[in-house]
Image (tube, helix red, strand yellow):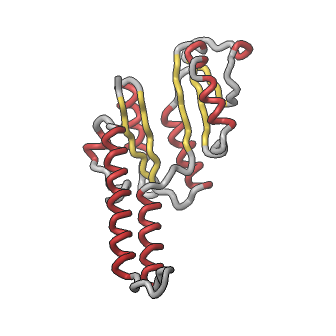
Amino acid sequence: ANLDDVELSDMEGSFDAEKHAEKKSMRVANARAQFEKNVKHYAPPPTNEFAAVNADAVAERAAVDAMIDHATRCPIKASLYWICRSQDEFDWFAALLEKCMDGPCQDMFEINLFCTRDLDRSKFNINVKNVFTGRPNWGALYQDVKDEVAQSFPGINSVGVFLCGPPLIGKQLRTTARRMSDDKLKFDVFTESF
């Protein structure tokens, strides 16, 4: 199974993170088991204390490793769009956001904060450069992502959009994803509503 082979019903409904993680874990375990089986099949019997591995076993191991890497790949980039009513709501999360921005994967993360009420930047306690007042324009954001993927990541043909929030925003994200998806890039939306 491939992570890209997600049923349409899975995309339209709620995303069950625990179930997804369990399935991914099972796929990795199955791939590793198949790898072990293939290595034993292709490897010649040991001639001394060090087992000799023939070219077929090495090629098989490389193919299985590539399959495991594909099934467990990490995102190239992660953009967080966080919407709150007041800037006080951002403060409880400030330390974690700053760790993301200063950590080993800092080049991978982009954090965008939207405050739907008035924002006093002089009292803002989070060291993030992308802070906006108002609600996000989803169409413009999807277009920005689409342009960035075309320019910086030309081999990428799908973008995952994950929402933990109100169902109305999920509906907006799915509608915009359908409108913005095309033959070159598809937006897949997964939602967890509360």
Given the current orientation, which residue lies at the most extreme left position? Answer: 9
**Is 66 placed above or below 55 here?**
above
Residue 95 position, x and y percent, is 63, 25
**Relative image position of residue 23 (x, y in whole percent):** 31, 49
- Of 121 and 22, nearer the camera is 22
Looking at the rendered structure, the number of numbered marks drawn on it comes to 0
Q: Quadrant of the N terminus?
A: bottom left
Horizontal side of 37 relative to 81 (left or right) equals: left
Question: Residue at coordinates 28% horizontally, 37% vertically from top-left?
Answer: 13
Picture quadrant of residue 190: top left
Q: Nearer the viewer, residue 154 or 60?
A: 60
Instruction: State the image quarter where residue 63 is shown.
Output: bottom left
Q: Quadrant of residue 171?
A: top left
> Is 34 on the left-hand or right-hand side of 9?
right
| Furthest residue toward front | 49
* Towards the viewer: 96 or 49: 49
Q: Which residue is found at the position 38% from the left and 63% from the top?
A: 32
Q: Position of residue 182 (x, y in %)?
A: 42, 52
Give the camera-side residue of 31 and 138. Answer: 31
The x and y percentages for residue 122 are 74, 14
Residue found farthest to the right: 122
Q: Image height check: is 121 above or below 77?
A: above
Quadrant position of the C terminus in the picture: top left
Name the residue: 46% across, 48% down. Answer: 159
